[in-house]
Amino acid sequence: MLAVVLLSFSTVTLADGLAPGESARIEYLLSSIATLPDAQFVRNGSAYDAKAAVEHLRSKLRYAGSRVKTAEDFIRYCASESSVSGKPYEIRFSDGHVVSAAAFLRQKLLQFDTQNAAGS
Protein backbone atom coordinates (compact mmCIF):
# COMPACT_ATOMS: atom_id res chain seq x y z
CA MET A 1 0.00 0.00 0.00
CA LEU A 2 2.81 2.41 0.89
CA ALA A 3 4.44 1.79 -2.49
CA VAL A 4 1.20 2.75 -4.27
CA VAL A 5 0.93 5.95 -2.24
CA LEU A 6 4.57 6.85 -2.90
CA LEU A 7 4.21 6.14 -6.61
CA SER A 8 1.08 8.30 -6.72
CA PHE A 9 2.90 11.11 -4.92
CA SER A 10 5.86 10.95 -7.28
CA THR A 11 3.52 11.07 -10.27
CA VAL A 12 1.70 14.10 -8.87
CA THR A 13 5.01 15.83 -8.13
CA LEU A 14 6.29 15.01 -11.59
CA ALA A 15 3.12 16.25 -13.27
CA ASP A 16 3.55 19.85 -12.07
CA GLY A 17 3.87 21.94 -15.20
CA LEU A 18 3.74 18.95 -17.54
CA ALA A 19 0.92 17.81 -19.76
CA PRO A 20 -0.54 14.55 -18.41
CA GLY A 21 0.64 12.61 -21.45
CA GLU A 22 4.21 13.84 -21.03
CA SER A 23 4.14 13.04 -17.34
CA ALA A 24 3.08 9.47 -18.19
CA ARG A 25 5.85 9.17 -20.76
CA ILE A 26 8.49 10.34 -18.26
CA GLU A 27 7.14 8.03 -15.56
CA TYR A 28 7.42 5.16 -18.03
CA LEU A 29 11.07 6.02 -18.67
CA LEU A 30 11.83 6.18 -14.95
CA SER A 31 10.03 2.89 -14.41
CA SER A 32 12.05 1.33 -17.23
CA ILE A 33 15.23 2.15 -15.34
CA ALA A 34 13.81 1.20 -11.94
CA THR A 35 12.89 -2.29 -13.10
CA LEU A 36 16.11 -3.25 -14.87
CA PRO A 37 17.26 -6.57 -13.42
CA ASP A 38 20.78 -6.37 -11.97
CA ALA A 39 21.76 -3.42 -14.18
CA GLN A 40 23.94 -0.54 -13.09
CA PHE A 41 23.56 3.11 -13.97
CA VAL A 42 27.02 4.55 -14.61
CA ARG A 43 27.48 8.21 -13.80
CA ASN A 44 30.88 9.94 -13.78
CA GLY A 45 32.65 6.59 -13.71
CA SER A 46 30.73 5.25 -10.69
CA ALA A 47 28.02 2.59 -10.86
CA TYR A 48 24.70 2.96 -9.07
CA ASP A 49 21.76 0.63 -8.64
CA ALA A 50 18.38 1.30 -10.23
CA LYS A 51 16.91 2.93 -7.13
CA ALA A 52 19.77 5.43 -6.83
CA ALA A 53 19.61 6.13 -10.56
CA VAL A 54 15.91 6.96 -10.44
CA GLU A 55 16.37 9.16 -7.36
CA HIS A 56 19.14 11.05 -9.15
CA LEU A 57 17.08 11.50 -12.31
CA ARG A 58 14.05 12.70 -10.34
CA SER A 59 16.30 15.21 -8.59
CA LYS A 60 17.62 16.47 -11.91
CA LEU A 61 14.05 16.68 -13.21
CA ARG A 62 13.00 18.82 -10.27
CA TYR A 63 16.05 21.03 -10.76
CA ALA A 64 15.39 21.38 -14.50
CA GLY A 65 11.94 22.77 -13.72
CA SER A 66 10.11 24.35 -16.63
CA ARG A 67 12.89 23.55 -19.12
CA VAL A 68 11.43 20.03 -19.26
CA LYS A 69 8.14 20.08 -21.12
CA THR A 70 8.36 16.70 -22.88
CA ALA A 71 9.85 13.25 -22.37
CA GLU A 72 12.38 14.14 -25.05
CA ASP A 73 13.40 17.18 -22.96
CA PHE A 74 13.75 14.87 -19.94
CA ILE A 75 16.15 12.64 -21.87
CA ARG A 76 18.09 15.62 -23.21
CA TYR A 77 18.35 17.72 -20.04
CA CYS A 78 18.24 15.12 -17.27
CA ALA A 79 19.09 11.61 -18.40
CA SER A 80 21.80 11.86 -21.06
CA GLU A 81 24.88 13.21 -19.34
CA SER A 82 26.34 14.60 -16.16
CA SER A 83 25.73 18.31 -15.82
CA VAL A 84 28.94 18.45 -13.77
CA SER A 85 31.42 16.59 -16.01
CA GLY A 86 29.54 16.38 -19.32
CA LYS A 87 30.23 12.62 -19.43
CA PRO A 88 27.41 10.55 -20.93
CA TYR A 89 25.37 8.38 -18.58
CA GLU A 90 25.51 4.67 -19.34
CA ILE A 91 23.60 1.56 -18.40
CA ARG A 92 25.61 -1.60 -17.78
CA PHE A 93 23.42 -4.68 -18.05
CA SER A 94 23.90 -7.86 -16.05
CA ASP A 95 25.48 -9.58 -19.09
CA GLY A 96 28.14 -6.84 -19.21
CA HIS A 97 27.04 -4.94 -22.30
CA VAL A 98 26.84 -1.17 -21.98
CA VAL A 99 24.60 1.33 -23.77
CA SER A 100 24.22 5.04 -23.40
CA ALA A 101 21.33 5.96 -21.14
CA ALA A 102 20.04 8.33 -23.82
CA ALA A 103 19.88 5.55 -26.44
CA PHE A 104 18.21 3.17 -23.99
CA LEU A 105 15.60 5.75 -23.00
CA ARG A 106 14.88 6.82 -26.57
CA GLN A 107 14.23 3.16 -27.43
CA LYS A 108 11.94 2.79 -24.41
CA LEU A 109 10.09 5.96 -25.37
CA LEU A 110 9.57 4.64 -28.88
CA GLN A 111 8.16 1.41 -27.41
CA PHE A 112 5.84 3.37 -25.11
CA ASP A 113 4.59 5.58 -27.93
CA THR A 114 4.08 2.61 -30.26
CA GLN A 115 2.16 0.66 -27.60
CA ASN A 116 -0.03 3.62 -26.79
CA ALA A 117 -0.70 4.49 -30.43
CA ALA A 118 -1.84 0.89 -31.00
CA GLY A 119 -4.21 1.16 -28.03
CA SER A 120 -5.78 4.40 -29.26
Image: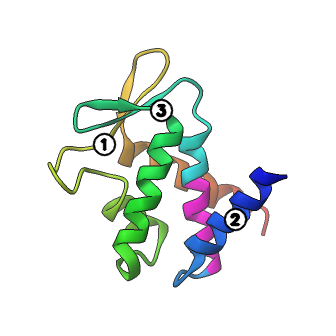
Where in the figure is residue 89, as x and y percent of width and height?
A: 30, 42
Q: Amino acid at mark 2?
A: Ala
Residue at 79%, 56% in the rendered image: 4
**Residue 9 placement (x, y as % from top left):** 68, 67
Task: Give the labeled residue for mark 1.
Answer: 89
Eyeballing the image, is 42 above or below 95?
A: below
**Does the rendering let one see residue 110?**
no
Is label 1 or label 2 in front?
Answer: 1
Q: Amino acid at mark 3?
A: Asp
| Mark earlier in primary sequence (2, 3) | 3
Horizontal placement of 71 versus 21: left or right? left
Q: Which residue is mark 3?
A: 49
Q: Quadrant of residue 22?
A: bottom right
Q: Are marks 2 and 3 in contact (CB under 8 Å)?
A: no
| Residue type, numbered disc 1 | Tyr
Q: Main secondary structure of the magenta part?
A: helix
Which residue is drawn at the image coordinates 45% and 43% (left, top)?
A: 53
Q: Residue furthest top?
A: 95
Residue 113 position, x and y percent, is 61, 61
Q: Is residue 54 magenta?
A: no
Residue located 14% across and 48% down the image: 85
Kindly indicate the quadrant of the structure image that contains residue 23.
Answer: bottom right
CA–CA distance in space, label 3 to label 1:
13 Å
Q: Which residue is mark 2?
A: 117
The C terminus, quarter of image: bottom right
What is the count of numbered marks?
A: 3
Q: Which residues, given as a range, are shown in magenta?
A: 20-29
Q: Is residue 93 above or below residue 11?
A: above
